[in-house]
Amino acid sequence: MGADRSGLQLDVLGAGPAYTDRPGSAGAAYLLRSAGTAIVLDLGQGAFPRLAAALEPSSVDGIFVSHLHPDHFIDLVALRHYLRWQFQPPRHVRVVAPDGLAHRLDALHDEPGFTSASLDVEAVVEGTTTVGGITVEAARVTHTRDSHAFRVSVGDGPGLVYSGDCGHAGDLEPLIRAGDALLSEVSFGPGPVPRDAAHLDGPAVGELAARTHPGRVLLTHLQMGFDPAATVASVRRVYDGPVDLVEPGDRFTIDGIGAALTPTGT
Ligand SMILES: [Zn+2]
Ligand SMILES: [Zn+2]
């Protein structure tokens, strides 16, 4: 199924945290499509089969990795094998990631050149990158030494701002425009976030949303042991727009005419 020509379609491939007891959970992975362009934000554990079920993976135009924690990139190993061995000659996909990704994947396989055989890795830079008709804006966030959030948009339409993992909600503020969809991690549910954890909780996301006026808040990356309903409620207490905790299989469409993101699937 193709995306609406005038807007942006989001398919949630994986919305899990670093570990979980929920069968069927997959690590962070979000497919965004517009007209003939498809990009993916992060590709965590278990996300590759879901990507392959959504579209033929070698047709992805770019994969953007928020940071180098494995729950955000480890299924690039499966993608690399697929591209290298499923096609003759091997196919390549563009990957925009923090410095060091290729080295880490090569080390996992103990094989120099493992990554470059099928993944064309380039360094993520602050500012704007264009992939086909899609614009991706990157901004640094507090988490690892080299972590980014992304705003994805088409033309002047509303965008989707994805937090990656983020220890300071205010870092997302420069990316968010009124009417955007805010897809934010909420690792510590209703909170509080332990002092040594660079993550967000519901109250921090809610206060950010109350200040920046996204059209919709989508919550993700909730850690095991936190109550989903209490988490959503902790955001709603301070933000009066729609709030949902996303799951794999969820699909949303941004209509491209300034309206809020609307769910179009289950
Ligand atoms: Zn992380
Ligand atoms: Zn994470």
Image: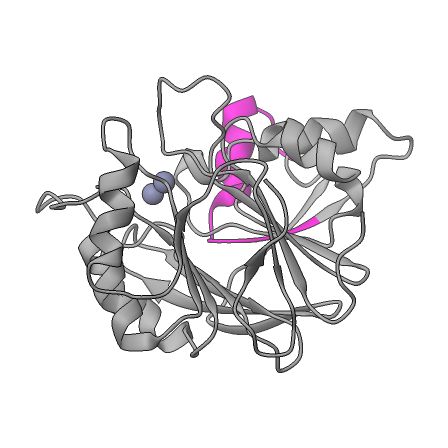
Residue 174 shown left or right of residue 155 in the figure: left
Q: Quadrant of the C terminus?
A: top right
**160 in magenta:** no
* Residue drawn at point x = 35 percent, y = 17 percent: 21
Q: Position of residue 26 (x, y in %)?
A: 50, 29
Residue 158 shown left or right of residue 208 in the figure: right
User: Is any atom of residue 122 visible in this view?
Assistant: yes
Q: Position of residue 179 (x, y in %)?
A: 47, 75
Identify the colour scheme used: one colour
As rendered, which of 115 and 255 lies closer to the eye? 255
As rendered, which of 58 and 263 lies closer to the eye? 263
* Residue drawn at point x = 15 percent, y = 45 percent: 191
Q: Residue placed farthest to the right in the image?
A: 88
Q: Residue placed farthest to the left in the image?
A: 195
* Residue drawn at point x = 36 percent, y = 31 percent: 18
Q: Position of residue 204 (x, y in %)?
A: 20, 59
Q: Which residues are magenta?
A: 94-114
Residue 146 shown left or right of residue 194 in the figure: right
Ligand 2 position by quadrant: top left
45 vs 206: above or below: above
Residue 24 shown left or right of residue 245 in the figure: right
Q: Position of residue 202 (x, y in %)?
A: 23, 51
Based on the displayed image, in which of its 4 quarters is residue 77 positioned?
Answer: top right
**105 in magenta:** yes
Numbered marks: total = 0
81 vs 23: above or below: below
User: Is any atom of residue 201 visible in this view?
Assistant: no
